[in-house]
Amino acid sequence: MKYPKEYLDEIKTRLKVSTVVSKSVSLKKRGKEFVGLSPFKTEKTPSFTVNDEKEFYHCFATSEHGNIFDFVMKTQNLKFGEAVKSLANLAGMRLIRFQSKMKNVKKIGKNIVQSTINMFNFIMMKF
């Protein structure tokens, strides 16, 4: 199921990358960026950077790079939909509920059957 772009953008607007990353990585401000030890590799010298203005993180040790959704997926081993739910919850947003296509088909089918019954009853009353 595809999330609306506006919904994903709202999550990104409400949550800074540094806020999400700092839940699992100790970050220190350095100029416009934050730096810390890589969550993807054991290291002694910080090679992990976060840039809130550009909305991404980058690990120079492993070449991992991405946005808040990518970070949560990689560090918590989640699928995209699960990462969206987790971040929406963190951002204080309501979760989007998707209806399965089958439910929509059943609903349309019931409406067609009910309309047919109504038409049949209307015709029978005329005779």
Image (cartoon, helix red, strand yellow):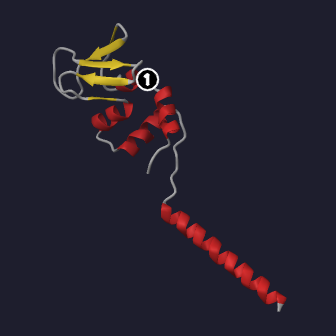
Q: Is residue 55 above or below residue 34?
A: below
Q: Is residue 118 above or below residue 91?
A: below
Along the viewing direction, whichever of 74 and 23 lies nearer the viewer: 74
Residue at position x 32%, y 42% from top? Answer: 78
> Image quarter for residue 74?
top left
Say which residue label 1 marks: 16
> Image quarter for residue 76?
top left
Left-right relation of 79 to 121 = left
Left-right relation of 16 to 95 = left
Q: Is residue 97 above or below residue 113?
A: above
Residue at position x 23%, y 19% from top? Answer: 37
Q: Is disc 1 placed on a helix, strand or loop? A: loop
Residue 20, position in %: x, y? 39, 26
Along the viewing direction, whichever of 28 and 61 lies nearer the viewer: 61
Instruction: Please count the marks in the image.
Output: 1
Q: Amino acid at mark 1?
A: Lys
Residue 100, position in %: x, y? 49, 59
Label 1 Cα crowd, 10 Å radius (few <14 / some 14-19 / many 20+): many
Q: Residue furthest bottom?
A: 127
Residue 51, position in %: x, y? 36, 18
Residue 68, position in %: x, y? 38, 30
Residue at position x 70%, y 81% from top? Answer: 117
Residue at position x 78%, y 89% from top? Answer: 124
